[in-house]
Image: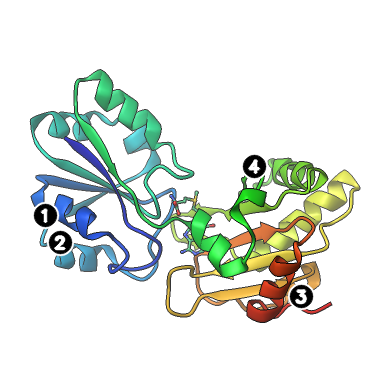
Amino acid sequence: MLSFVGLGLYDGEDISLKGLRKIREADHIFLEGYTSRLMGIKICEMEDQYGKTVTVLGREDVEQHPDTILEYAKEGPVVFLTGGDPMVSTTHADLRIRAAERGIKTEIIHSSSIISAVCGLSGLQNYRFGKSCSVPYPTENWFPLTPYETISANLKLNLHTLVYLDIQSERYMSVPEAVRLISAMAEKKNEPLPKLFIGIARAGSENPTVIAGNAETLVNADFGPPLHVLVVPAELHPIEEDYIRTFAGYHD
Ligand SMILES: C[S@@+](CC[C@H](N)C(=O)[O-])C[C@H]1O[C@@H](n2cnc3c(N)ncnc32)[C@H](O)[C@@H]1O
């Protein structure tokens, strides 16, 4: 059996009781550490909490060489842990299909996800979001403009955009960095910069930061430690506007 278990958003208290039970029953625990991270708990603290060893996997281990996970899962219960919900903005559908092709039973233990947390923290209505995008750290020869294009296409349809920020081994993109990169993309395309952004840091923690404003406000704001995520709102519904005035320091 291969159980995909969501860890929730921030620390060791965010996993469900069902997820914890699956961990306690499992012979092997794997954690993918590349699509998201829980910043409020270290791996060694997870191992203490579970009383078991946690093997951390990189993208290649999961996407190119999943044989070890699948072989263990053929023999007995295996848990595959992911930050947030295990099937939201990840590529784990592929691993589940590969398991099914080998006759391995699978199940999903869902958890809170950044997708729903953003609606609660920003007050933006979930059915008004269009396609999401990710802003990667550019390299010397690579500066993709697709995040700006996605935001722009959503704005034309009056839809909000959820913008994921790059996670590299020990480097986490911040809201100010992302807004600077989106401004550079707009400049490169010679197109206007969105008028409003909402930056969110540490969703799921006891002290999340939520700040709404124009690019200049967000570039100069202090969001504190990671993880960070960004929203580019479309035209606001009056309740959405009231919400960011009340909870995200927004003013005209
Ligand atoms: C690719 S998404 C993976 C989503 C995850 N499976 C989930 O359901 O939450 C990861 C990105 O979401 C954002 N994110 C995830 N957790 C967050 C948190 N607790 N606070 C702020 N941003 C977060 C970051 O921008 C991060 O790079």
- Label 4 SS: loop
Q: In the rendered structure, which disc, 3 or 2, sits on the residue that comes first in sequence?
A: 2
The numbered disc on residue 50 is 2
Give the quadrant of residue 100.
top left
Task: Work out whether residue 251 can be spotted.
Answer: yes
Q: In the rendered structure, which disc, 1 or 3, sits on the residue that comes first in sequence?
A: 1
Do the residues bearing badges 4 and 2 touch, measured as CB atoms within 8 Å?
Answer: no
Q: Position of residue 136 (x, y in %)?
A: 61, 49
Question: Which residue, given by chain and number where applicable, does mark 3 sit on?
Answer: 217
Q: Amino acid at mark 4?
A: Lys
Do the residues bearing badges 1 and 3 touch, measured as CB atoms within 8 Å?
Answer: no
Q: Badge 2: few (under 14), some or many (20 or more) residues near its Cα, within 10 Å?
A: some
Q: How far apart are labels 1 and 2 at the CA level?
A: 7 Å
Task: Work out whether residue 64 can be spotted.
Answer: no
Q: How far apart are labels 4 and 3 at the CA level?
A: 25 Å
- Label 3 SS: helix
**Left or right: 224 as drawn, with respect to 106:** right
Q: Is mark 2 within 8 Å of ligand 1?
A: no
Nearer to us: label 1 or label 2: 1
Q: Is mark 1 within 8 Å of ligand 1?
A: no
The numbered disc on residue 24 is 1
Q: In the rendered structure, which disc, 1 or 4, sits on the residue that comes first in sequence?
A: 1
Q: In the rendered structure, which disc, 4 or 2, sits on the residue that comes first in sequence?
A: 2
Compared with 21, 225 (above or below) is below
Q: Amino acid at mark 3?
A: Thr
The numbered disc on residue 131 is 4
Q: Amino acid at mark 1?
A: Arg
Q: Nearer the viewer, residue 240 or 60?
A: 240
| Residue drawn at 64 percent across, 42 percent down | 131
